Amino acid sequence: MHKQFRLVPASSPPDVEKLLRRIKDAGVNLAGAGGSNVEFGGEFAFAVDDGQEDDTERVLKQHGYRYRLFDHDDHPELTVCWIENRPGALHECVAGVAAANLEKGRIIRDILVGIDGDKGIAAQVFSEEVRTPASIEDAGATGA
């Protein structure tokens, strides 16, 4: 569960059940899902079993969904923690992300917790950059 799909489940009107049915009908297994206001313009975030990303992209494109795909190896917005099923495990993950975010001018947008697998429970924390003195200085230094 190293990648995360993010999209507004827009058909007309937005319909998360229809999106999930299409994913199911394509034989794709969800390894984790989350979101807020998913039928009110918010994003639905989900991860699929490793190796099913291409099938997922195919079904999303086939039905005209506009999506974003994040890989934690390539996108600093997405952090993946493998946590144990015990009190405080998610807190430890989030506390580490929050501390790292302070240095990068980011805040947590949402958290997706997956199913218990071979490595433990995957928790994906998605963060976005906010305007801070540090981020403005960094942007000026790189010419961005």
Image: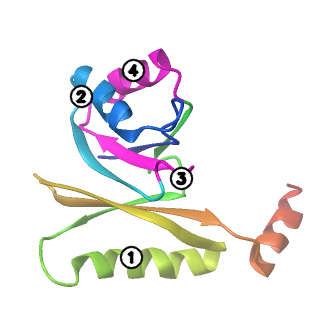
Where is 28 relative to 133, above or below?
A: above
The secondary structure type at the circle numbered 3 is loop
The secondary structure type at the circle numbered 1 is helix
> Which amino acid is tagged 4?
Val
Which residue is drawn at the image coordinates 41% and 18% (left, top)? 58
The secondary structure type at the circle numbered 2 is helix
Determine which of the numbered discs, if any, sits on residue 24 in the image: 2
Residue 106 placement, left or right of 25: right
Closer to the chain start, of discs 1 and 4, is 4
Is 89 in the magenta? Answer: no
> Which amino acid is tagged 2?
Lys
Measure the C-alpha gap from mark 3 to mark 2: 21 Å
Determine which of the numbered discs, if any, sits on residue 94 in the image: 1
Per the image, the residue denoted by label 4 is: 59
Closer to the chain start, of discs 2 and 1, is 2
Closer to the chain start, of discs 3 and 4, is 3
Q: Name the image quarter holding the C terminus.
A: bottom right
Q: Residues within 10 Å of mark 4 (few under 14, many from 20)?
A: some
Residue 44 placement, left or right of 80: right
In magenta, the rendered stretch is: 38-65
Residue 114: x and y, percent?
24, 55
Measure the C-alpha gap from mark 2 to mark 1: 30 Å
For marks 3 and 1, give the one nearer the viewer. 3
Is 55 in the magenta? Answer: yes
Per the image, the residue denoted by label 3 is: 42
Quarter of the view holding residue 35? bottom left
